[in-house]
Image (spheres, rainbow, N blue to C red):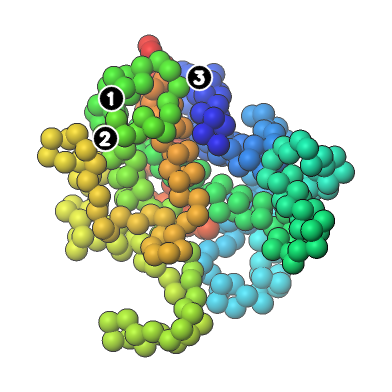
Amino acid sequence: MEDSIIEEGRLMAEAFEMKEGTQFNPKVLVTNTVGNVITRFVFGFRFEYGDPVFEKLAEDFELSFESFSITSLGSVFPFLYYTPLYTNFRRPIQDVVSYIKSVVNDHRRSFDPLHLRDVIDLHMAEVKGQRDENKMAAIEEGWEWKFIFELYAAGLATTTDTLRWAILIAAQHPQLVHEVQKEIDDVIGGRSPKFSDQSLMPLTGATMLEITRIRPVVPLGVPRCTSRDAVVQGYHIPKNTTVLMNLWELQTSPKYWKEPDKFNPYRFLSEDHKTIVSHRALNPFGIGLRVCLGEKLARMQLFIIFTSLLQRFTLRLADDSLSVGMEGKAGLAYGPLDYNIVLEKRNV
């Protein structure tokens, strides 16, 4: 996976370079990059920038995400998803599922157990092995599309919006970016970043932590359900109760942070600025045994792609976006409002 992320980070930087000197919204390129990491993993291929198939997929996901949030009426009364109230949610989802199923069917027709190409093939090989050995099915046949859809749904908007916050914040803090770029130059130089570089780059790592602290893209986490009756701080919570985690409160409250509204990566550094210091209130990927399964992959993408950009470019907000602040737009994920940037290529 890391090699694919490194390659996508490089290709994204090349696509950004073609925009040098012009103002543009990085949203499309970032979405394509994050989507390609998932696509390589599940489909065994990537989409070129501007591919109409991926543009349609990205548009469908965005439309459905905008129509859904964990605090919406549909989350409380699921039957509403089948009413006209949620037409804008259902139609794009149906289109996405239809495309995924078509790719799965193509894989099924060309499946070769001796040459496994991707996750779809691995799934089919496992099902075939269970069937050949007359074992009870641990993996259901024909449900590959559901697993793939969930990977896209969980990883596309969240990672894309985190990177969009990262680019916006970098453009708003040029002095900090200058210091991060010095660290990048000292540790990485002109080669492609690797995830293992992060251990030698405390300021870059702290900057990524502060981005995920000040703007968690899933502010209320993912809904969970209690498996038994419980009492929490005197409150009785019955079995099968839906529970939300207020990550926004944990990560932006003055009870846990000094000047929580101020962007300050140095809060995560030791006094000598050489090591990262953990904080118990930082939980952007959730809490407990059911934390996000994709946490390591997401952290790898965020570090490699963000570092690849700052390695090659200095970013600033375009004149028409100078007033863009830190307010976001809620949906499945909490992303920044649209903005435009201008790039200046660095000599590396």
> Residue 80: which quarter of the image?
bottom right
Judged from the image, the secondary structure of the residue bearing numbered disc 3 is: helix
Q: Nearer the viewer, residue 227 or 48?
A: 227
Can residue 299 be seen?
Answer: yes
The crowd level at tag 1 (other Cα within 10 Å; few <14, some 14-19, many 20+) is some
The residue carrying mark 3 is 17
> Residue 113: which quarter of the image?
top right
Q: Residue at x 47, y 56 (%)?
A: 292
The residue carrying mark 1 is 183
Q: Nearer the viewer, residue 238 or 248?
A: 238
Mark 2 → mark 1, Cα distance in angstroms:
9 Å
Taking 140 as reference, is 183 left or right?
left
First of labels 3, 1 by sequence position: 3
> Residue 43: which quarter of the image?
top right
Determine whether label 2 and label 1 are within 8 Å by CB.
yes
The residue carrying mark 2 is 202
First of labels 2, 3 by sequence position: 3
The amino acid on which the numbered mark 3 sits, given as a three-letter code, is: Glu
Most distant residue in the right direction: 109
**Does 98 sit above or below residue 107?**
below
The amino acid on which the numbered mark 1 sits, given as a three-letter code, is: Glu
The amino acid on which the numbered mark 2 sits, given as a three-letter code, is: Pro
Residue 274, numbered label:
none
Q: Where residue 117 sits: x, y (%)? A: 72, 37
Q: Quadrant of the C terminus?
A: top left
Mark 2 → mark 3, Cα distance in angstroms:
27 Å
Q: Residue at x 31, y 50 (%)?
A: 214
